[in-house]
Image: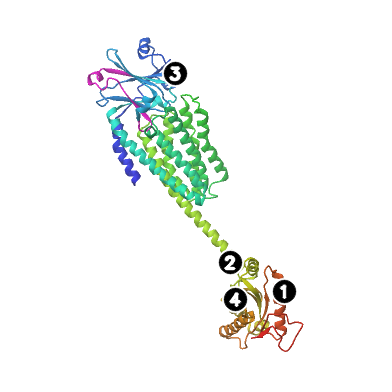
Amino acid sequence: MRLVFAFLVFLCLGSPALADVPMSDRLCTQSSAKNVTASTLLTAGRAFDCSGNKYAVEGPRVWVKMPFPTESVPFGTMEVQGDSNGLTTMQVHAVLDDGTILSTNFSEQEVIDSWRPKGQYGLAIPGTENPDTRSRIRNIYLAIDEPKLVSSLLLLKLASQKKSDELKLPLAIMFAVLCGMIVMPLIYNLFFYGALRYSFMLWHSVMICATVTYTFSSSGLIFIVFPETGLISKMLLNYWSLAIGIAASGVFLVRFVEQGKIAPWLQGAIFVAALIPLAVVAIVLPVDQGYSITARAYYNASFIPVFLIVLYTMVHALRRGSKAIWFQIAGWTPIVIFGLDRVARGMELYVGWPVLDYGLYFVLVSETIILALGVAYRILRLRQQHEDTLRKQVELTLLADTDGLTLMNNRRSFEREFQRNQHDYRFGHLAIFDIDFFKRVNDRYGHEIGDEVLRVVGKELAATHHFAARIGGEEFTLLMRNDSRENRKKYPANVLTEICETLIKAVHDRVPEIQEPVTFSVGVAAIARRAALRSVMATADRRLYDAKNNGRNQVVWIDVSEAKPSKPSGTASI
């Protein structure tokens, strides 16, 4: 809404400019050497070219003859306005009804100082400040030394100096505001790119920089900040910034749209089309000023392929289900429309309405804002996808590390925890639990009851502060944490005996279908630093079998296989 309001304000401010008198259809041209003066030219009587080929004129000095329509121009001092790109020295001559010539010569710096918004100059016509003299002016002769572009002739017009001066400050402020609006998404991109590293943010930043540079230069703001800037330098800056922006937009389009929504062959076509303006600028507008007056036509024509490719890509990606492409459609469709108008005028297909040039700046700003919203949308979507991927990875990891029946740690997670313990040594003992006569439970009460027993045991073991895991069948392991120095003096069997009593009571209370008590045999082994899992498991397993062979329902924490008294030392009945 603010952008629309700004555009309406511009129309109100710029409405006097609509009263300017375009001269493209009325002017005639002629070329000469640079030492030829206006009086010499008129004395020679050489005919001016008023045909359709009048813009093809070339020479060290190009003369433009324009009638002065006294009745149709505003009162006050009048000036000749035109495209300032690539100009150097100029002259303005007013020929009166008696043949008198009023002349003013302008150096390149004076042409620069006479800048008008949107990259134009305004040179006062001598004699128009005096009403009596003004009424006697019949023709205006404009001398342009070494013009570089056809637009130097094509966009010539007569305008009121007073009204142009009044518009200069408001329009300069408007362009400065537009530049500020464009820069804001750049700050956002640079701030988040360091953390997120999405490539399309970088290319969008390049596009923004190119847009700001073009707006800053072509609008004339560059002459306020850098008054010594030459007109040729300004021209090169305009053309190169647009070409770089188009090249960056091609890469941005491919990187921004969701993966798979643009066919590989079309991605290649986008890259090639986006680079064409850059290549044309390098060829027809080299820095060494070796360009011709027809360079503007080649330059504008180079944008046609990328405009067509972009239009096709938007339809193509939309049909493939892309959501992000809607931001390109909203932001780039107006640019393509205004761009095609600019191309047509640049190729001299028609003169057009100059106010459309101002519209291009507004759609460039709106495109930057819309794509900034698109960048935020894509970042949000990519973050959601990243979080979904991480969540799935966590779920898969949990599935891989979790026993499906008891929902506790499985053998895989147990082995990994044991390996980790070799470094931080948090566990001092390994205990293996085995449910006594578990096959009898399954045979007598069914596998559903047996599974319920396993779930109850797993839940109770997992509730301890030790690391519990089911390693297969009715066997469970417990990595016992190292407690305080006082608790370490107690046999681990004391803790394990309490755990087994808790298990027996839990199974009795939660599985009432089983009439007899369900007991447990436990084998315990100490875990030395850097001890291998295989050796510790072998020791605990051997002691588990000792517990079973000695009558079950007991905890064994030393080897008792060789000595078998009535109650071997190192056993504890439950």
Q: Who is closer to the viewer here, 67 or 565? A: 565
Whether 136 is among the magenta residues is yes
For the residues labelled 3 and 2, the Cα–Cα distance comes to: 80 Å
Q: Which mark is residue 398?
A: 2
Residue 104 left/right relative to 488: left
- Residue carrying label 1: 538
- Residue carrying label 3: 60
Extent of the magenta region: 116-140
Q: Position of residue 82 (x, y in %)?
A: 37, 27
Amino acid, disc 1: Ala
Choose mark 4 or mark 2, whichever is in front. 4
> Residue 40, located in which quarter of the rendered image?
top left
- Residue carrying label 4: 485
For the residues labelled 1 and 2, the Cα–Cα distance comes to: 27 Å
Of the residues under marks 1 and 2, which one precedes in the sequence? 2
Choose mark 4 or mark 3, whichever is in front. 4
Residue appearing at x 43%, y 46% in the figure = 187
Judged from the image, the secondary structure of the residue bearing numbered disc 4 is helix
Of the residues under marks 4 and 2, which one precedes in the sequence? 2
Residue 177 left/right relative to 318: left
Q: Who is closer to the viewer here, 27 or 39? A: 39
Choose mark 3 or mark 1, whichever is in front. 1
Residue 458 position (above or below residue 318): below
Whether 297 is among the magenta residues is no
Which class describes the residues within 10 Å of circle 4: few (<14), some (14-19), or many (20+)? few
For the residues labelled 4 and 1, the Cα–Cα distance comes to: 27 Å
Q: Which part of the image, by quadrant, shows the C terminus?
A: bottom right
For the residues labelled 3 and 1, the Cα–Cα distance comes to: 100 Å
Q: Position of residue 2 (x, y in %)?
A: 34, 46
Q: Position of residue 347 (x, y in %)?
A: 44, 29
